[in-house]
Image (cartoon, rainbow, N blue to C red):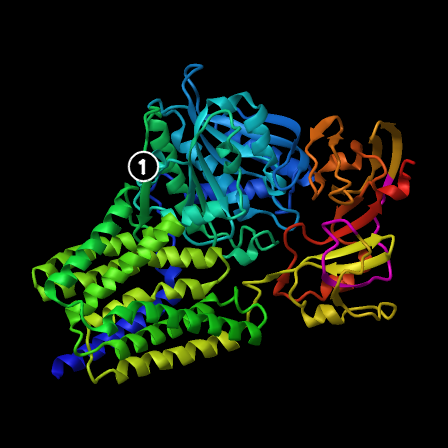
Amino acid sequence: MIQARRNSTFLTLALVAMTLAFTFSLSLVAPPSPDADHAFNTEAAMLRLSRILGDERPHPVDTDANDAVRERLLTEIIALGFDPIVRDDFHCTNHFDGVCARVRNVMYWAVPPTNDTTPGVALMSHYDSVPAGPGAGDDGAGVAVGLEVSRILKDRDDLRPVLVLITDGEEIGLIGADSFVNSDPLAARIDAVVNVEARGVRGPISMFQTSNPNGNDIAAIAKTGRTALTNTLTTSIYEAMPNDTDVSRFLDADAPRQVDTTNFAFILGDSFYHTPGDNLANLDHGTVFHSGINALAAVEQFAAHPISGAPEGDRLYFDVLTRGVVSMPAVFGPAIILLSGLLSIIALIRTGTWRGWRGWVLIPLTLIGVGLATVALSAVLGAIKSGAAYSPAHPWALRGAVSAIAVLVAAGLAIWLRDKRDDQTGALLKSWLWVSVLATLGLIVFPSTMTFFIGALFIASFGIIAGLMKRDRWLVGFSALAALIYVLINLPMLGFALAGLGGMAAPFAVLWTIPVVMIVIVLPTQTYARLPLFSVSALTVAMIAAAVFVPIYTSNAPRGLSIQHIVSDAGSFVQLSGRAKPPQAMMDNASPSESASFVFADPVGATHPAYARARWTRPASSAPDIEASLRVLSDTTQRDMRRVSLRVVAPTADRLHLAPASAEAMWTSLTVDGVAAEPTLWGLRIAGRNVRDMQIDITLPTNQPMGQIAITRFGLGPDMASFVDSRPDWVLPSQAGDTRVRLMDLDAAIPPQP
């Protein structure tokens, strides 16, 4: 009886701790503070970045601001004693559905080659930003890391060549990387790439992408005291998502040679991502230090060991709270899962503990119950508060509510289903068999999910062997240790996934069922279950209340919302980005002549794919000041194809987006100032000053409409000042920022051929 009371206390503490651990998972793996004794000098790196960014204006590709940033970047490179190379190229790629721009990649040898044959390592970042923000994190931090790492490596004669590659035009569509891979002679000399990226302004660095196979890559990331957050599952999830960085171009099948890769990024503070808040004031110095020491270690490892060409093998891997990386041959994962399952079956039969139905349904019923409860709670919170599913200002509140109800339901069901006649040994063996089954199903559906289970199953196997020998205390002890290992391995993995996927807590909270069930079995409370259940119930109520009442956005975690002032044949309109309802202050802002309120619809009269989508829109009393004209240079027909040459003159434009009218009217060829581009149904985007006077040649089937052209100018005119001022401090322009757009129908200027 006394032991049951103690177990009740310990179980209460364990359940509360697990709830709070899930809630604040990423706080457990904060980046290290800059180390003044480390070779990577964070203060020097940040000072260089401050000088490069200057007045922190946004500097998208091929703009005056980008020219200024590049000149300051070249000054810093020369001051370090290196000889920079600038490659100037007007380049088109079909990445992101077709895009062209004039890019100027900057590169230099931190460790120069000593001959013409030895391949080298590229340390890569990009220096352009989106139009909405200055890009201190994305990717000024990567540039700063590259410069500081090159300072450290300078004069090293024990390494293979190291090229610092700082691309241009990444944000609009990886154009600089595509240009380098396809046309730069140095591309063929690179056999390993270390990329430093960002999707936020703080947090630990993560290594989220490798080449395949990944043996050399994993060897390169484990050589620093504070490793990156990394695991096989996160890498596989990233590869399955439609996201890309410059690394993608090096891993494409048509790249000049296959490379080893480590792709690093930090993602916390992502509310500032691609907004004016991505600035030096918000960029965390510890994050830059964590990025720097991991990039340095990876470059040194790649450069110190020539790629032999021998099969490197594929490995499973995971970090342990950024204190080290555990890796093993990929075949070990299925072997551990199979072994633990077989051992559980043998132990159940040999000990005779296979009887008793409750132990068999313990794991599946708690999984189902937790899944239903967390999904229902997320739906209710989403209905109460629009945007609560993401909740960037206080993500802990949503995460805490979901994790608390997951732990409550799991513990409640596990306590209820624990049968006194179904002894502790039988319950543990049945539960570990179920974990093996779940791991096997995951292995079949999405192989990398075994990363969740193999650490715990490996430790549990020793306990299962003890169970075979009827040493029940050893089984209990190893089961408790396995549950702890499960938590330690998966906490950073779950936290990173939650941050990267925008707070989708419910599916991940279900995974918390397993250690909860194990702890309930390890600490039987008999009739003293009220204390743990009451404590977790109270915590659940508190967390749900917090999720309901805390604000979704604040000035430190803003909402991204850009304003578009559009003119088309149907008139002039104001359109807001995103589907969520805008702040009421912006909804109410209108001059007396603009009495029409915002509606979620598509009244701009456009067939252009970028603007023919429902958005919050209302009429505008004035048209945006953006000059544009089209002139037909030639219009010829041969057989069933029509070729039209246009001159587009738009002296104040910053971007241009051509789009065909439909799939039936799809263009068969397209050139921009003589450079071939691949037509897509989404059309072709062209960025930079070239759009102000350019020739476009289009070939399409006869008797088909030409399509539309959108001409964009960054920023809004003075006629929109009051509307811009109505934006609350917790709302910032994002991505392309506030813009003026003129939509023009190509057929209006070019009548269709008979």
Instruction: Report how many numbered discs are placed on residues in the image.
Output: 1
Q: State the residue at coordinates (43%, 56%).
A: 497
* Residue 32, visible in the rendered structure: no
Residue 172 placement (x, y as % from top left) = 63, 42
Tell me if residue 38 comes above or below residue 371 in the rendering: above
Direction from residue 644 to residue 428 in the image, left or right: left
Q: State the residue at coordinates (52%, 50%).
A: 199
Which quadrant holds the C terminus? top right
Which quadrant holds the N terminus? bottom left
* Residue 647, visible in the rendered structure: yes
Q: Which residue is mark 1?
A: 219
Q: State the residue at coordinates (54%, 20%).
A: 185
Tell me if residue 174 comes above or below residue 738 in the rendering: above
Q: How packed is label 1: few (under 14 Cα within 10 Å), some, or many (20 or more)?
A: some
Tell me if residue 380 comes above or below residue 163 in the rendering: below
Q: State the residue at coordinates (71%, 54%).
A: 738
Q: Main secondary structure of the magenta part?
A: loop
Could you say which is closer to the camera, residue 236 or residue 564?
236
Direction from residue 144 to residue 406 in the image, left or right: left
Residue 295 placement (x, y as % from top left) = 40, 39
Q: Amino acid at mark 1?
A: Ala
Residue 371 placement (x, y as % from top left) = 41, 69
Could you say which is closer to the camera, residue 25 or residue 473?
473
Give the magenta range: 607-629
Direction from residue 36 to residue 242 in the image, left or right: right
Tell me if residue 686 comes above or below residue 583 in the rendering: above
Determine whether the residue tagged by mark 1 lies in a helix, strand or loop: helix
Q: Is residue 213 magenta?
A: no
Residue 648 placement (x, y as % from top left) = 83, 36
Residue 717 sits in which quadrant? bottom right
